[in-house]
Image (spheres, rainbow, N blue to C red):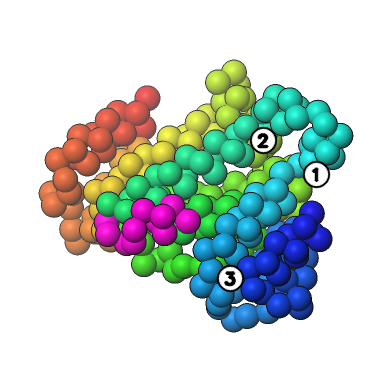
Amino acid sequence: LTAAQAILLLLGNMDLFDAICHSFTTMATGGYSTKQASIAYWDSAYIQYVVIIFMFIAGTNFGLLYVILHGKFRKLFHDEEFKLYLYITLGASTIIAIVLFLNGYANLELSIRESIFQVVTILTTTGFATADYLLWPPLTGAIIFALLFIGACAGSTSGGLKCIRLNLLFKNSFIETGVMGFFILYMFIFAISSLIMSLFTQDIATACSAVISSMSNVGPGFGEIGPMDNFANLHDFAKIFLSILMMVGRL
């Protein structure tokens, strides 16, 4: 895999030294680059797509890759962790690409490429960069923030919780009635609700604090709903949504 990526990067006009170094650090999900600007230095769509593909492969369970290399391709789509890994990648990339395109960030192709690259590099904990996502709309930042916790597949060199644990914890929340199940369900509702709220606020702090303040029935939060402000200026839908969260929190 390392050799294959190096060859493909050479075809993209990256010199031999850079191609080898970036192939090493991609497959190890290390992310270190020979350039300060990282992958953005080359400003090449071809190179970015190559790196995206191999980052995604590097985030896959290497035991599963070994089985695939022996021709057992059905194992790939029967593996629950890989399917979750794939769904998270596609789902997050699609949402971010749509938001970027609708906000006039770039044309459709660049919006798709930038979104996929950032999602995969964060999810696999590789750490390459091609864009400053802090300048993107709040919703994209909230999604990327959530991805920081997840990681890719067990059996890969990525960090984070790993998709297999996320899958098990999610399933456990529906059958476990104890403290752990409550905590997992609580945090899951918080995460999804924060993503929704980020559509109606100017910053992540306001979105997240509004959600947790409502769920915990606290009152004030941060940003637009700080102790010297209130919820009056929020969008009507946001107020209805937070009202529901207040009831959910009590339950």
Residue that numbered label 3 is attached to: 39
Residue 96 shows in the view: yes
What's the residue at 71%, 77% (across, down)? Answer: 15
Q: Nearer the viewer, residue 205 or 167?
A: 167
What's the residue at 71%, 44% (across, down)? Answer: 60
Q: Quarter holding the N terminus?
A: bottom right
Q: Name the amino acid type tagged 1.
A: Phe
Mark closest to the chain's N terminus, 3 or 1: 3
In whole angstroms, how far apart are the C-alphas of marks 1 and 2?
Answer: 11 Å
Residue that numbered label 1 is attached to: 62
Residue that numbered label 2 is attached to: 82
Q: Nearer the viewer, residue 191 or 84?
A: 84
Mark closest to the chain's N terminus, 2 or 3: 3
Residue 140 x, y percent position in the rendering: 39, 53
Magenta range:
103-113
Q: Is residue 129 above or below residue 231?
A: below
Q: Is residue 105 left or right of residue 31?
A: left
Residue 185 x, y percent position in the rendering: 50, 31
What's the residue at 41%, 39% (across, down)? Answer: 192
